[in-house]
Amino acid sequence: MRVIYNDGLDPFFNLAAEEYLLENGATDYFMVWRNAKSVIIGKNQNAYGEINAEFCEKNGISIVRRLTGGGAVFHDPGNVNFTFITDAEEGESINFYPFMEKITAALSEFGIEARANGRNDIEADGFKISGNAQCVYNCRDGRKRLLHHGTLLFSADMASLAGALNPKKEKLESKGIKSVRSRVANISKMEGYRGPDSAEEFACALVEKCAEGAVTRITPEEAAAIGDMAERKYSAWEWNFGESPRFSDSAVARFPFGTVEITYTARKGIIEEIKIQGDFFATGDIFLLERGLAGTSLEKKELLSAFSDVNKYIHGASAEDIANMF
């Protein structure tokens, strides 16, 4: 098994690193890593239904889709992540416990008596401290590889966690997989914890306790290939938002020029149908505006472009006013 301590905080790079090692690696891996502020959503989730987009934008929180299923999780430098990669046998089913047991054994050496609970969580003192996810990955050369990864809340910013994972769901209907919210706690604040004070030191200590050999780093050659994948895929709107299942949403906003209500249906982040209503003064046929919006992606820059001449249809409105409603 190759053991990797990855000290970079770029969430796009770090998620790409997992896929690179799955596709190109010929051995087992154990990697410990941390991310800058980000929400990591499950492969089958609707990004729009899992996050508070306004909060994330204001607080510089990135959104990244991962390869595994399950629910959305918040990452920041106070959250320590671990990844196991092994070969998978034909027909092998998902099994969390062998990997989670390795982590609970390591936590016991820090004074934390933790246990696997439910489908994919690790708990201590009645609080969730770790969420885990897993998938079988089909390599291009026909091999099957198993990816297991999880989080360890060490000193995460709980206010940001709560704010980022608090979508405004009242009027959103989605067929994406929903996250299950649990009571969570930081390891560093738990009674009985004896270990390093910082998340970085804890990550280093964790990799040493779980290592079955020398600890290595990602090589410059690997970093170049991973960086390319991060740019092409993991930082792309098409992967992070464009993979979202079909959903419907609506929003109402009051402006000096009147009230605007928007109801729309989108699939893979692309508007299929939209209806714009309100008590504003129309200066053009709203139907023409609605028809022109079909096929527009729910990216901020694309919405701003699509509504660039909205004042021709809604007196006093600006592109920024209407685009911010999505």
Image (cartoon, rainbow, N blue to C red):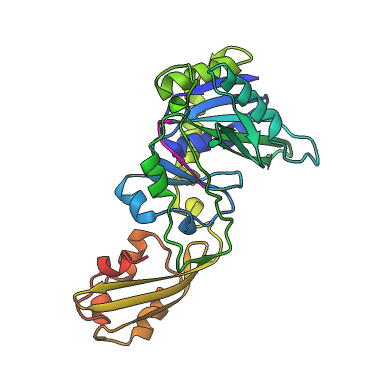
Name which residue lies at 50% across and 39% down: 229
24 with respect to 312 (left or right): right
Residue 27: image location, x then y, percent? 67, 24
Quick one: which residue is furthest to the top in this view? Answer: 214
Question: Quadrant where the N terminus lies?
Answer: top right
- Residue 210 picture location, percent across and down: 60, 18
Asked if the stretch drawn in magenta spans residue 317, the answer is: no
Q: Quadrant of the C terminus?
A: bottom left
Residue depicted at x 42% and y 68%: 296
Q: In this view, does 70 lie to the left or right of 321?
A: right
In the image, residue 19 above or below residue 104: below
* Residue 306 image point, x, y percent: 34, 70
The magenta stretch spans residue 75: yes
* Magenta segment boundaries in residue numbering: 72-78
Please say if 100 is above or below 171: above
Residue nearer the viewer, 66 or 74: 74
Q: Is residue 294 visible to the viewer in this orientation of the structure?
A: no
